[in-house]
Amino acid sequence: MKAVRWTSGDKPDLELHDEATPTPGAYDVLIRVEAASLNFRDQAILDGAYGGPTQPNGVPLSDGAGEVVAVGDRVTRAKVGDRVAASCHPHWIGGPPRPEYQMDSLGMTTDGMLAENILVHENAVVHIPAYMSYIEAASLPCAAVTAWTALNLSSPLQPGQTVLVQGTGGVALFALQVARMFGARVFAITSTEAKAEKLKELGAEAVVNYRAFPDWEKEILELTGGKGVDKVIDIAGEKTIVKSAAATRKGGDISIVGFTSGFGGGLPPIDILSRSLHVAGTAIGPRENFEALLAAMAQHDVHPVIDKVYPFADYRDAYRRLASGDHVGKVVIDVAH
């Protein structure tokens, strides 16, 4: 089979390899990968800017979907021919995050989806709904599950609540779609009018262009009658966290899911204390969150937003597309073609 692996070094490159197809152990499932998708952290690894653990010379990409082609003799959760994706942390089935879950991470500490086949423990297997294509399903495991988890992190999302999303990357658009499934009102910030129109098409009630309105938090406060939103999904980190707090209602929730603008930010503790804000970092989430997300998407016939699909041979172009920041939705690699 063909597989892409990182090279060694602080800023690794990517190399295409010809390898033997792995053989399932007793509890393993062999998946023929049909499609895989990229997340911000995949580019961060190549830039030497990812702070989490990674496997030397590993296969990248946590996100993908495909068909089961072989199973171990003790497997009960999948059979040959099943259409499946895989949970990013194979043994995190439910409950809060634990260190041992984080240390077992597809495309990070173990081989990921940028290969023609992947071997996963059956605990990771998630069955995808019939209406959803492999391209669509491949976009979900990290960004969509993160969005679902973040919206329900400090308190369950309720109909009629207000949610602020940032940008048009995978997590932001999935958060918008999930919030709308719950009957929540969504506000958004972005950098261009074209992106603003896409956000509105997906159901955003109002969109603020942060280039035209650098003090965008004031615009969000005005849109909410001076109250602020119930929940913020903060993706950029350093350049947004203080403004996110200012745009959140007293007692509201801020879920930090990314660091696209850096690791700093300087949110004063008094801003949190005086307004009783709930600020929490968001891990991707357990398998049960992925399964709940898929059930909700199927119920509402929701389709992921796909920016562009690249053939396997053009995987470097897919990375370049992600790095450009011009994408709206998910960048996907069609591994089967």
Image: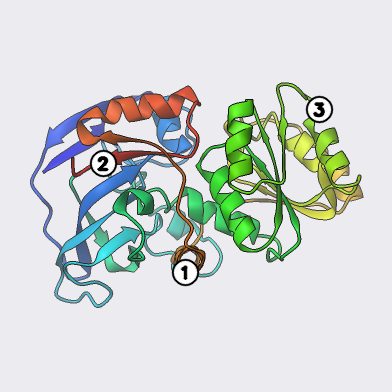
Residue at 54% from the left image edge and 50% from the top image edge: 174
User: What amino acid type is highlighted by mark number 3?
Assistant: Asp
- The answer, for residue 253, to whether it is visible in the render is yes
Mark 2 near mark 1, Cβ–Cβ under 8 Å? no
User: What amino acid type is highlighted by mark number 1?
Assistant: Ala
Note whether 241 is above or below 142 in the view shown.
above
Q: Could you classify mark 1 by the number of other residues whose Cα lies within 10 Å: few (under 14), some (14-19), or many (20 or more)? A: some
Q: What kind of element bears circle 1?
A: helix
Residue 141 x/y as whole percent: 42, 53
Q: Which residue is mark 3?
A: 215
Residue nearer the viewer, 37 or 281: 37
Q: Which residue is mark 2?
A: 334
- The answer, for residue 283, to whether it is visible in the render is no
Q: Which mark is residue 122?
A: none
Could you tell whether 51 is left or right of 108 in the image? right
Residue at 79% from the left image edge and 42% from the top image edge: 245
Residue 222: quadrant of the picture: top right
Residue 139 x/y as whole percent: 40, 48
Quadrant for the C terminus in the image: top left
Counting residues from the start of the chain, the first of labels 2 and 1 encountered is 1
Residue at 26% from the left image edge and 41% from the top image edge: 334
Q: Which residue is mark 1?
A: 295
Mark 1 near mark 3, Cβ–Cβ under 8 Å? no
Note whether 154 is above or below 220 in the view shown.
below
**Distance CA(mark 2)–CA(mark 1):** 24 Å
Residue 198 x/y as whole percent: 57, 38
Counting residues from the start of the chain, the first of labels 3 and 2 encountered is 3
**Distance CA(mark 3)–CA(mark 2):** 40 Å
Q: How is the image coloured?
A: rainbow
Residue 209 x/y as whole percent: 71, 28
Residue 26: quadrant of the picture: bottom left
Counting residues from the start of the chain, the first of labels 1 and 3 encountered is 3
